[in-house]
Image (cartoon, rainbow, N blue to C red):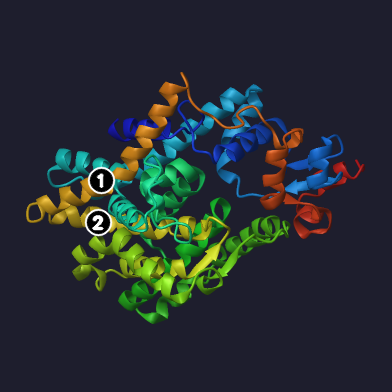
Amino acid sequence: MLCASASFFCCFILGIGGFWSQSYDWFVKNPLLNDLTLSEWPLIIDFSNATLEVKSLCGEGRAGFVYYLFFYLPAATIGKVFGSLLVARFSIFLWAVYGLSLVLMWLLRLVSRPNSWRNTLFAVLLFVCWGGFDIIGQILRIIYLWYQNCHHIMPTSLIDGWCSPYFTYYASHFTSIFWSFNQCIPLWLITIVIFSFFDLRVIGFLYSFSLLYSPWGAIGLLPILLFGIVGKLNQIGLKNIFQMISMSNVGFPLMICVIVGSYYFSNNTSLQEKGFFWNFISVGEFLVKYILFILVELGIFIWLMRNRIHQDALLAGSLLTLLLIPFYKMTAPNDFLMRASIPALFVIFVSWLVWCVEHYQKYKRIIWIVTALSSFSALQLVHNTTKYTILNHGPVTHKEEKLFSDCDDAFIAQYGEKQFYAHDYQDTFFWKYLAKSNYDLINGQR
């Protein structure tokens, strides 16, 4: 009951489904869910009846819609059955609540004994509050801007963007749910399943599911997985590496790579920005911000758990992953840093939770200070969504009734053209062979 209540609160207050004020990113999520509910799959956008402004942006032909949309499919299916967008929105809300409840239930099992009630409440509180010391970073940013005689500081700006623009943030749990619930919730569950059992015979099978929900998250999960495999083989003997050669570990991931990979790569639109840090900022600026960023986001956890790192391959692999991710950037807001870090940050949190339970009596004050300081990102999001909902006399939503396939909104069309539309999809492997029935239909063949 506690898990369900906490999950319901988190998903509701962070705007999933549009029953409370949403993040700005929902201007993509809402039309996507609407299209998946009302249109055939895979999505194809027809611009022949679009407005002149949209045609000037996207042309007059058709485009395949390419995105990691798998989290939306169950809710869209239910919406199709009932013929209702409201049902689809409510379904995706319940789907997110269900997934987050599973995450919390696993965490509670991890720390349920001894002192189960205290540990249960403690685990839920730590999950809700967990994040980096963004409030410290924001204070340092304000001091720096004042020193530079810049007094036009937005007091309501999100504090986790204190080290922007290159570094953006390592997300708190609330921040991840607010902006990318469709990526973080399945990635947390996949990470839990993999590392709870860590069976070499199915490890590739389980890992391949991450490609369905977040390609960047799959990249961030891979080095942790490799560290875990090395640690496991060190325990059971190198000769057991042959356990990994199985149909589930080889055949299924290969099938996922062919199907999902060909779908993703059918969109040949290049990212606006990608490359190593020296393509965007100077080495000196990078090093100063990098050191400050790591200290503020991870420093306290590295210090307090320093004796645990060399004993835990997964923790060590996660820290190394988080230390390396900032060296590369993908997309203008650096989605790679924000999303590839999700699995590693979750492993850090699980290790932190276990450490807190084990050392609570000795480090009680430190634990509560860390929890309080790391909770500001979550508190700010709750404050903002509640304030906007009250001032608006209802939830602030974005493009709630729009469709990508309507082609009457130039803003949506421009954004889709930059990221989601595959104009040459007819000649790509996925659309030509794996989605052939739909491919024939749009080409006038039955």
Residue 433, quarter of the rendered image: bottom right
- Quarter the N terminus occupies: top left
Q: Are marks 1 and 2 in contact (CB under 8 Å)?
A: yes
Extreme front residue here?
A: 149
Question: Percent from the top left, x then y, of residue 305?
Answer: 21, 64
Q: Residues within 10 Å of mark 2 (few under 14, many from 20)?
A: many
**Residue type marked 1:** Leu
Badge 2 marks a residue whose secondary structure is helix
User: Nearest the camera: 60 or 150?
Assistant: 150
Residue 45, quarter of the rendered image: top right
Residue 286, quarter of the rendered image: bottom left
- Residue drawn 54% across and 41% down? 25
- Residue drawn 36% across and 34% down? 382
Question: Percent from the top left, x then y, of residue 4?
Answer: 34, 32
Residue highlighted by disc 2: 352
Separation of disc 1 and disc 2 at Cα? 9 Å
| In-image side of 271 versus 365 (left or right) | right
Q: Is residue 386 above or below residue 279?
A: above
Q: Which mark is residue 126?
A: 1
- Residue drawn 85% across and 34% down? 49
**Residue type marked 2:** Trp
Asked if residue 202 shows in the view, the reply is no
- Residue drawn 39% across and 28% down? 387
Q: Which mark is residue 36?
A: none
| In-image side of 247 versus 135 (left or right) | right
